[in-house]
Amino acid sequence: MLKANKISYAHRKFSILEDIDVSVNHGELLVIVGPNGAGKSTLLSLLANEMGKNESSSILFKRKSFEEWDDKELPRHKAKFSQSNSHDIPLSIKDVVMMGRYPYFNTTPQKQDNDAVTKAMQETDVEALATRDYNLLSGGEKQRVHLARVLAQLDNDVANKLIFLDEPLNNLDVLHQHRILHTIKNFTERGNTAIMVLHDLNLAAQFADTVMLLKRGKIVSHDVPDKVFTREIISSVYNFPCTVCPNPVNKNPLIIFGT
């Protein structure tokens, strides 16, 4: 689905990422984790083609460079949820979610657009807020609205779609964290792919197919969760003691810090 080689990035001569290789398969949920400043969001933006072309690196999406994609066709195949969104949008919730359908119509939404918006709002539990003013929502509600917008964008008959998610669980309570993660997991189980940045290691262990652990712009480990989340690796990367034991629910790694 996506293959990137030698991803490097520096800002004002300060190295943020150094020689990162990424390969993500169809139907895979890759979660990127690491301490603050590890380069997680920068890597996600580079993989999503949001920071311009880097001559020293190579990124192929469905075996084509982003430059080879038609600008009108690409939004049907990939979408990105960003960590930061505008806090001042003078629109209703439904209108904000409808922004995800802009690649599909010129002036007036069609039935399939309204259906996609309704479905996305149901999945993110904001349908009851549809007519409310976006600016009056809480931080968690705004987060779910933008997730709905991204999901609505990819509601089409294209096979093997790709979604990028940068900290999609910010400001969400436990119920909505798990609800969103199950939605993303269902998305990948239909043959699509997701690349997501998370801080919660236990949620990453529970939902990820593969995990990439970064520290200071370099890959420390990239493997299945139980190979990445070991006591030695986690304690070293985060410089904080931890215990790793099997999760009694699903046998995935369970990380307990401070012990």
Image: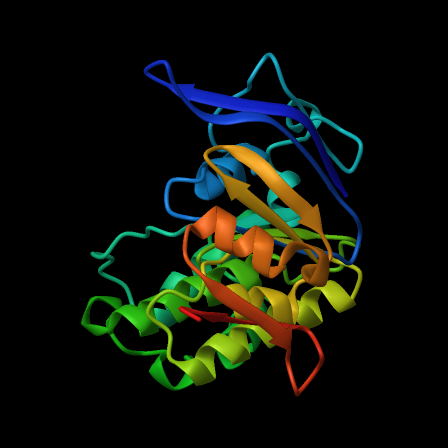
- The residue at the point 77 percent across, 43 percent down is 1
- The residue at the point 38 percent across, 40 percent down is 37
| Residue 33, x across and y down, in percent | 52, 52
Foreground of the two, 106 or 126: 126
Image position of 227 (left or right of 259): right
The C terminus lies in quadrant: bottom left
Q: Is residue 218 above or below residue 68?
A: below
| Residue 83, x across and y down, in percent | 38, 52
Q: Is residue 213 above or below residue 28?
A: above
Image position of 186 (left or right of 25): left
Q: Is residue 105 above or below residue 17?
A: below
| Residue 255, x across and y down, in percent | 54, 70
Residue 207 falls in image quadrant:
bottom right
Residue 187 falls in image quadrant:
bottom right
Foreground of the two, 223 or 63: 223
Foreground of the two, 32 or 121: 32
Total count of labels: 0
- The residue at the point 25 percent across, 57 percent down is 89
| Residue 159, x across and y down, in percent | 80, 54
The answer to whether residue 34 shows anywhere in this view is no
Image position of 77 (left or right of 153): right
Foreground of the two, 164 or 79: 164
The answer to whether residue 185 shows anywhere in this view is yes
